[in-house]
Amino acid sequence: MKLIRPRRKLLVFEISRREKDLLFEILRLYPLVPPAHQRLSKTAATGRLNEHQRLLEEALAAQRAENRKHILALLDEPGRFETAPNGLLLKISRSEADWLLQVLNDVRVGSWITLGAPDTEAGEKIPLNEETAPHVRSMEIAGAFESVLLDALTGRQTS
Amino acid sequence: MAATAAPEVRPGVDREEETDSRTDLEPGYLVICWNDPVNLMDYVTHVFQVVFGWKRQKAERHMLQVHNQGKSVLTRESLEKAEFYVHQLQRYTLHATMERDQG
């Protein structure tokens, strides 16, 4: 997937059919991060903040349900993908790209949590086996799509 | 959410709630982003820019602080605003919390 036309509002990417299938495969996994994973505070656990925590979880769950509903509908819209000589053209607005980033990152972080949230920066290794491989794959593919979108949003080109 | 002070003044519990509300309106909460090994550095910078409206340079400075020092205090706000920002950051699956400013 490669940005070919950066415009003020619309981003046009060249994407192969294989990449499109991968993108849909990853998006179908959403949401992966459990709402209870997010804590409002590390230290405070008073009754009032517990109530706020509950509200935060409800809000995140509602937002994810809404995202889930729209996610594949958005990409299935007529004109979203157009046939091109080297595959397909994907057209998305900058705000849609930002929204896709949120969704892809949920899959990336959720896969990492499923893997036991390994601290790879501290040298912890992710064991690669039949059980972990699909999650490592989802994490890496989501990250790769994120990088392309981030480069497009910040005006950097990718190959 | 923080309750606003009721116009009617009554003794006892209500007075205590009023004190809480006043405290809630003071910028006594720190919005902190914590390091994790999974969020991409460019992604974190992007989220800071979107959520706080910061220029790239400032967003990158905070991202690097998160990465190198384990956390960065992003802003100091009232309870309600801090909660709003934490919610925004968590929508992007960043590891963000709000803590009482003990300083």
Image: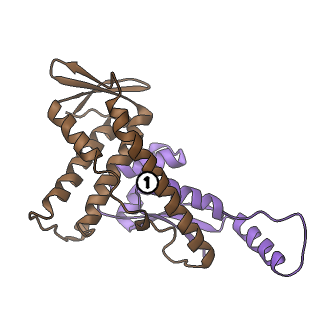
Chain colours: A brown, B purple
**What x and y, as percent, mark residue A67?**
42, 45
Q: What residue is drawn where x is 58% and y is 56%?
A: B84
Side of A35 where A43 appears, left or right: right
Side of B90 where A74 appears, left or right: left
Amino acid type assigned to the residue bearing label 1 in the image: Arg
Q: Can residue B85 be seen by looking at this rendering?
A: yes
Q: What residue is drawn where x is 15% and y is 63%?
A: A132
Q: Residue furthest top?
A: A85
Secondary structure beneath dot 1 equals helix
Using a 10 Å C-alpha cutoff, classify the residue at mark 1 as few (fewer than 14 neighbours), some (14 to 19) or many (20 or more): few
Tell which of A58 and B68 is nearer to you.
A58
Quarter residue B102 falls in:
bottom right
Quarter residue A110 falls in:
bottom left
Q: Is residue A155 above or below residue A100?
A: above
Q: What residue is drawn where x is 28% and y is 68%?
A: A117
Tell which of B74 and A88 is nearer to you.
A88
Q: Residue furthest left?
A: A129
Q: Is residue A8 above or below residue A48?
A: above
Quarter occupied by the C terminus of chain A: top left
Q: Chain of mark 1?
A: B
Q: What residue is drawn where x is 77% and y is 74%?
A: B17
Q: Is residue A42 above or below residue A11?
A: below
**What x and y, as percent, mark residue B88?**
51, 53
Tell which of A72 and A123 is nearer to you.
A72
Residue that carries the numbered disc 1 in the rendered image: B61
Give the number of callouts.
1
